[in-house]
Amino acid sequence: AQTVTQSQPEMSVQEAETVTLSCTYDTSESDYYLFWYKQPPSRQMILVIRQEAYKQQNATENRFSVNFQKAAKSFSLKISDSQLGDAAMYFCAYRNDKGTYKYIFGTGTRLKVLA
Amino acid sequence: NAGVTQTPKFRILKIGQSMTLQCAQDMNHNYMYWYRQDPGMGLKLIYYSVGAGITDKGEVPNGYNVSRSTTEDFPLRLELAAPSQTSVYFCASSPSRSGARTDTQYFGPGTRLTVL
């Protein structure tokens, strides 16, 4: 069965600095998607970025980028120029590209942004 | 386009009571999901559906039931509420696989349920 592990329960970053959140996963599949979701205090789950496993190029969305290492089964999120509004829980998620189409979530990393 | 809507936003139940959490989406998505999120934890899948009339169990289905009679609606039923079901419940939907930028989950705002 697939698993997703986030080993950092909490991280802190100074405003305007860069922070990297870690995520590892385990799967025997070759085709899958990986996601980072943000959950602010409002509880609303918001997609931050997604990565297709068949793409070697790392995904980027403005200040957010990933370091996808398929062989190592690692999918870290880098937030550049951190802003106070980035403070939230961040969840890493995995989804097969076939089969049941279920999403598997990690336990989350709480990011604090210090002014 | 309202996206994914959930009602109610908050609810307090007594042990043994029953209730239905409502979920609706207006994006014509085939896939719908129910998750629970316990304090400080990630999301655990309760049930999911790949289309009207088709549902299947997720990771933690005990104590819950679902139905999917239409594409739009996916209600979650708690039959005999227990304190262990105190949690925040999220409904989500996603389109059929396309590889497009829209191919992800869309979440409702959540329902905070307390069982006393």
Image (tube, coloured by chain):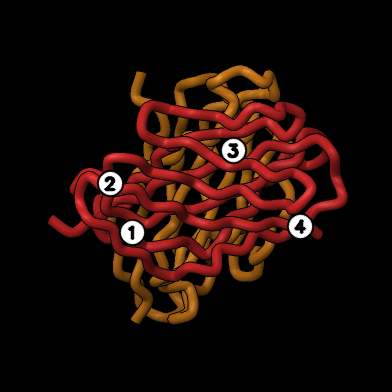
Chain colours: A red, B orange
Extreme residue in the front direction: A17
- Residue type at numbered disc 2: Asp
Name the element at disc 2. helix
Label 3 marks a residue whose chain is: B
In this figure, which residue is indicated by the disc labeled 1? A111
Earlier-in-chain disc, 4 versus 2: 4
A51 or B114, which lies in front? A51
Q: Are marks 1 and 2 in contact (CB under 8 Å)?
A: yes
Identify the image quadrant of the N terminus of chain A: bottom right
Question: From mark 4 to mark 3, how far is it between C-alphas?
Answer: 24 Å
Question: Marks 4 and 2, how far apart in space?
Answer: 27 Å
Q: Is residue A29 above or below residue B89?
A: above
Q: Position of residue B76 (x, y in %)?
A: 53, 52
The residue lying toward the viewer, choosing from B91 and A39, is: A39
Q: Residue at x 66, y 52 (%)?
A: A74
Please state which of the two labelled residues, at mark 1 or mark 3, is closer to the viewer: 1
Mark drawn on residue B32 = 3
SS at mark 3 in the image: strand
Give SS at disc 1.
Answer: strand
Which label sits in the foreground, 4 or 3? 4
Gap in angstroms between the C-alphas marked 1 and 4:
24 Å
For disc 4, the marked residue is A26
Q: Earlier in the sequence, mark 1 or mark 4?
A: 4
The amino acid marked with disc number 4 is Asp
**Could you tell me the amino acid type at mark 1?**
Leu
- Asked if both marks, 2 and 3, belong to the same chain, the answer given is no
Label 2 CA crowd tier, 10 Å (few <14, some 14–19, many 20+): some
